Amino acid sequence: MSPSSQLPFASGGSSVLLMKINRGAEVGLVILGLLWTANVFVLSLSVPKFEQIFADALPGKPLPDVTEFIFRERIALICFVLALPIPALVMFWRRRPYAVLWINLGMIWLLVQGAITVIALVMPMVGTTTGMADAGR
């Protein structure tokens, strides 16, 4: 068996290029796994604590819509995040050349979702809307 036929994306061409693509996909999977873990952690452990903090500190005050959405749809977001890496892993395992695309799309989605979640949790505390900054007034 030739070395290039053992690579996930081997379909001809330079074996050095294929080895670099394979290494890049492996690194991408590691990064995807780290982002996945961070998102699941934030959604499953941090969001409920923030929900309790806001309920105690801002009783009856409206929260920003994005914050309410994160609180209300947290379980659906967790399910989506849990299912997100599956297509990338399957395509990588089946040695599909477009697995790298799915890995990159997964990383972009997890970065965007993580940023939106963090912003949604911080907005009520910094006073960008009526929030904790106005609580003592």
Image (cartoon, rainbow, N blue to C red):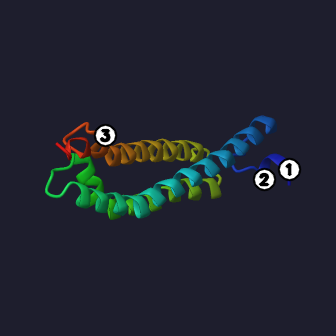
Q: Amino acid at mark 3?
A: Val
Between tags 2 and 3, which lies in front? 3
- Which amino acid lies under the numbered mark 1 shown in the image of this protein? Ser
- The mark nearer the N terminus, 1 or 3, is 1
Give the Cα distance between marks 2 and 1: 7 Å
In the picture, measured across the screen, residue 45 lies left or right of residue 96, that is left
Label 1 vs label 3: CA separation? 59 Å
Q: Residue furthest left?
A: 60
* Residue positioned 84% across, 48% down in the render: 3
Give the left or right position of residue 14, taking residue 54 as reference.
right
SS category of the residue bearing label 1: loop
Residue that mark 3 sits on:
126
Q: Helix, strand, or loop for circle 2? A: helix
Q: Specify whether 123 is left or right of 28.
A: left
- Residue at the disc numbered 1: 2
Asked whether disc 2 touches disc 1, contact meaning CB atoms under 8 Å apart, the reply is yes
Q: Toward the viewer: 134 or 121?
A: 134
Residue, disc 2 = 6
Pointer 3: residues within 10 angstroms few (<14), some, or many (20+)? few
Is there any visible trace of residue 73 in the rendered image? no
**Residue 52 appears in which quarter of the rendering?**
bottom left
In front of the other: 6 or 63: 63
> Are the residues tagged 2 and 3 within 8 Å (C-beta)?
no
